[in-house]
Amino acid sequence: MTEDNKTVLVVEDEEDILALLHFNLIKAGYRVDCAGHGEEALQLVDKNTPDLILLDLMLPGIDGLEICRRLRNDNATKEIPIIMLTARGEEEDVVRGLELGADDYVTKPFSIKVLLARVQTVLRRRIELPREAEGEELVRGDLRIHPGRNLVQVAGAPVELTFTEFRVLTALASRPGWVFTRYQIVNAVRGEEYAVTDRAVDVQIAGLRKKLGVCGSYIETVRGVGYRFRDDL
């Protein structure tokens, strides 16, 4: 593999899992930094910004969800790809992490081969995003979306969206009237290999509608199928 110059920060308090990830990531050609708790992770990010973070949710001190929240709320770190590691596999944890802007998740115990594929996919997606996002500004009623600038405005006022929310909105608004199934929404945002529940998609849509305010009604529910962006604006 040729992943040289890409740095992965592994945040994991279980030493055996940390060692396993460190060994296999190095073997795959990545540079690797390691942290055993939340405070150390934040210090390492501040010192040497990684290209991707593997973030365990169950950490002593500052937990993984709080780390994710802080990174996404900081302009200097909000674009760092984050893959969550969770031993619990509970839907609530996954949904919450996605709401906070995590890019993907892997449930323990995991296959190293699958995890490395997820890492490669997320890194490739973030590298390709600027080229994909060079499209023209989308204007739909009182909503303006500028893919290249990652900017959304409602009635002239800027709206702060997570990376995932922005991708969902752009996918829907780019094809008004087109009905997207939940699977198609996930595929448009993250790729075919991404496994997520219908509930997680519904939570993303609900959060997006809330942030869009008066324009939230532009996203319609098609019962039993999925969602579509209104084409009568």
Image (cartoon, rainbow, N blue to C red):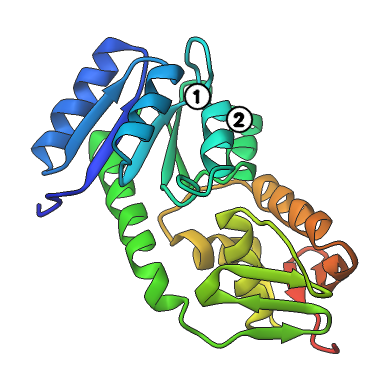
Total numbered badges shown on the rendered structure? 2
Counting from the top left corner in percent of width and height, residue 47 is at 31, 32
Rendered residue at 55%/43% (across/down): 72
Image coords of residue 143 (percent x, y): 77, 77
> Foreground residue, 124 or 225?
124
Residues at marks 1 and 2, CA–CA distance in whole angstroms: 8 Å
**Location of residue 138 (image quadrant):** bottom right
Above or below — where is 78 with respect to 61? below
Of the image marks 1 and 2, the number of the one nearer the N terminus: 1
Residue at screen point 53% across, 20% down: 63
Give the residue at x 53% y 17%.
62
Is 212 on the left-hand or right-hand side of 135?
right
31 with respect to 202 (left or right): left
**Amino acid carrying mark 1 in the image:** Leu
Q: Which mark is residue 57?
A: 1
Looking at the rendered image, the quarter that the C terminus falls into is bottom right
Task: Tell me what residue is drawn at x 27 percent, y 24 percent.
Answer: 34
Q: Quadrant of residue 220?
A: bottom right
Task: Reply above or below: 5 against 36.
Answer: below
Q: Which mark is residue 93?
A: 2
| Percent position of residue 68, x then y | 53, 35
What amino acid is labelled 2 in the image?
Asp
Q: Position of residue 116 (x, y in %)?
A: 25, 43
